[in-house]
Amino acid sequence: MRWRDVALAVAVCVSGVLRLCGAGGLELDLRTSSALQVNQVLRTLYAKGDMVRLKEIAEQVVQQNNTEVLQDLSFPTVYQYLGVAQYSLGDLEEATKTFELAVKVNEDDTHSWVHLGNCYLYQKKLPEAVAALEVGVKQKGSVKDTYALVKVRNWMADWKDREDLLAQVRETLEEGLRSGQLPDANAFDVVKLPPKMLVELRRRAYQQSDATTERFEHTQLRLQAPELRVGFVSSDFGVHPVSSLLRGLLALLSSPGHQTKVYCFTLSNASSWWSRNISRTVDFMISLKGKNPLDAAKLIQSHEIHVLVDLNGHTLHSGINIFTHRPAPVQVTYLGYPMTTGNPSIDFVLSDGVATPAETSGDSFSEKLLLLPMHYIVNDHLQMLGHTLEGNRPPLSTFFELDDNTFVFATFSNWQKMDPSVFSAWMEILARVPSSVMWFQQYFGHEGVIVNLRAEAEAHGIDGERLIFSPLDPWIDHTYRKRIADLILDTPLKNGHTTILDALCAGVPVITLEGERMSNRATSSAMNALDLRDLIVNSIKEYVELAVYLATHKHVLQQLRKRVEDNRLRYPLFDTAQYTTKFEESIKVAWQVKKSRLQAGGLPHEMHIFPSIQSSVVGPRSFPVLSAKEDNHVEDEYVVRVQNALDAQQPIRLHIGGHVHSPDWWIVDANDGDIVDFVMYISNLYAFPDGSVDTIYSSHVLEHCTHGFGHELERTLSEWHRVLRPGGQLLVSVPNLFALATLFINESIPHQHRVWIMTVMYGGQIDQYDLHKVGFDEAILVAYLTQAGFCDVTRHDDFGLFDDSSVLVIYDIPISLNIQARAC
């Protein structure tokens, strides 16, 4: 047998004898084989991506302790192959030990030095990682791995000779494009590249192995399945931000209301509360740990998955190569890697129109765009962190030895998302706001980082002690603590993702500099979903000026913070139920497109899928705010109160925005007060089940809703219709714009009276809720009511229930439009 034919063989090792089946039955005794023969076998298994057998054979060679083979430096050492296999199969600790042996055997083994540095990095041993990569890149000359040194230096906030190193990375990438000798895919996330170059580099990386990859065909039987089968592949179903974000979506998708079966394919067997909780809620949790990509793909394919979702991209212990075998008809990358994967077998990247604008993002992805009608980063915050909405903001002195009047800027991004330009901006802000500090969290490696950042501050003329640091508490605790911050300054290089959601959930305003890539537009997406677009800036100058302005105009910042706090429950950012519906709708559309093409027998080329302009954003949030602080068994007192009334068969009558207590009515208002029974937004009566309310009365409230952006009016009427029982009564009074306009243009009315009429038209505007955003005459109001599902609409002069604005008369003209309607 010629050694170049080894690629056609399957290796099986028994008692030190390696049998190569399919190649004439040749047997190779590892105890007596030459270094050349062993290297050929290991290289072939590596080229095939057969990491399981590569690990087995390499371990056998090491156990045979053939000094001639183990010490031969003519080829990559057995230890290098073994370390790569262990790393690929997720055994990071064993891989580290093996690479340490590899560089002892051959100190000029640049690949093993770089692998060792990466192993140290992913075990959070930053000084060791820097030392190993300095040897591999600078001393041993592995220039193509400069990106790895830049990455670990970023984690240390060590920016010396940074620009020179970045220039070297760019040059390496450009040379790789010319020569076809491409560096590791993760090199692309340390430098800014033109989108087309980035996509081309990623594509080239896959083209090298594309021709020999085994792919699955998808049968017609799969097309007739009664439910959609969705699989999620990740190494992060443990203590990881992906789990904390995704838990609620997975649970809701698996619930009876959705015709979806949810499969989680985990690449790690590490046990945690998160993995146990997720495994209890989804239909199937299946381990792929220790499997080759092809074997993992076969297992996935056996479950006849319709849509397979990658949650890793090119991150640690990624399963991206599984997708190359096409185990599912539709394959999507989502959430874990905000860039293109370059994998031609990935059909879609799931995002939204703010993070990836359709008109400018097509060239940035090898995948087609599958855009949600809302923010793409899912979260579970109001099911797990409801306690952050409770109580008063804790004083600064509770956590730091600082005066409570100190202004606290903060960034909660990890070190590798920072760079010299944003740090200089922060120092300028601190210089212009003297009684202020900058707050960071102590991520791994913080001992060295604190020294580096404080030295950088001193170089900018800022006392290093004005940079303050706090330990990373458990997620549900440190998110609560974040409320002490006054203003969050986002990182423009790579935005905060989970950390920004944490801050917004804690009610803290965020300033973000919008970028041109998905990774630095994620915060813009979240801010848009909270109606906070005025905190999105487009230049570093604006970033600095807005931060200084808000820090020196406390009343403006106070109003802004109240807006953030209120909008958490009014806008869709934290609405996991609505998100789940939109997510499911989007992947079903992608599946239906693929299904129709498969049925037609045509080539399944993909196309961009965008949300309809008339997206159904009027659906209310249908779940209570919960907290995981008490073993995840917290119940909402409002829900209990309503259920008790229903169990007692008591009629439920709601007075929306009422100002007078009545024993027969529950008052619902956005602002708390002595007579308020339920503090809720009128568009979100989550404590009341469908069809549970007998009567809703509302006087001069609906005009506070928007009729355009946010669709608050439609959302509110749809919500009222939802909670009313069939035949339940809606009694609604609104300012009659026709009557008010008639009065306003009457020139005989004194000026001061006309001003008062104007306030009735536009609201007194004594707080953020006292704004009138829509006007009604009878025809306009009836049209909105009919659209929401009400019927039998009649007009009344007086409901005879309350002495309020519904009976207001100005100059003998009734200024209210009083309408009764039935929930049909």
Image (tube, rainbow, N blue to C red):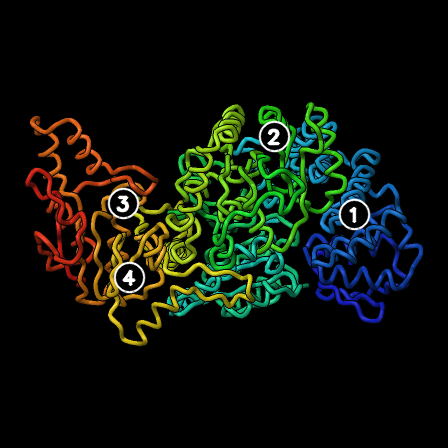
Disc sitting over residue 435 in the figure: 2
Disc sitting over residue 666 in the figure: 4
On screen, residue 686 versus residue 463, left or right, reads: left
Q: Position of residue 72 (x, y in %)?
A: 90, 50
Q: Secondary structure at mark 1?
A: helix
Between 81 and 391, the one lying in front of the other is 391
> Is 676 situated above or below 693?
above
Between disc 3 and disc 4, whose residue precedes?
Answer: 4
Q: Which of pointers 4 and 1 indicates the residue nearer the eye?
A: 4
Camera sees residue 2: no
> Is 199 situated above or below 284?
above
Q: Residue furthest bottom?
A: 648
On screen, residue 188 versus residue 678, left or right, reads: right
For the residues labelled 4 and 1, the Cα–Cα distance comes to 66 Å
Q: Mark 3 and mark 1 in contact (Cβ < 8 Å)?
A: no
Which residue has dot 1 on it? 116
> Is 61 situated above or below 146?
below
Q: Looking at the picture, which amino acid does disc 2 mark?
A: Ser
Between disc 4 and disc 1, whose residue precedes?
Answer: 1
Tell me which residue sits at (12%, 31%) in the image. 744
Between disc 1 and disc 3, whose residue precedes?
Answer: 1
Between disc 2 and disc 1, whose residue precedes?
Answer: 1
Which residue has dot 3 on it? 705
On screen, residue 236 versus residue 71, left or right, reads: left
Q: On the rendered image, what quadrant is the C terminus found in?
A: bottom left
Q: Mark 4 and mark 3 in contact (Cβ < 8 Å)?
A: no
Between 81 and 740, the one lying in front of the other is 740
Q: Position of residue 98 (x, y in %)?
A: 82, 54
Between disc 3 and disc 2, whose residue precedes?
Answer: 2
Local packing at callout 1 (Cα closer than 10 Å; few below 14, some 14-19, many 20+) is many
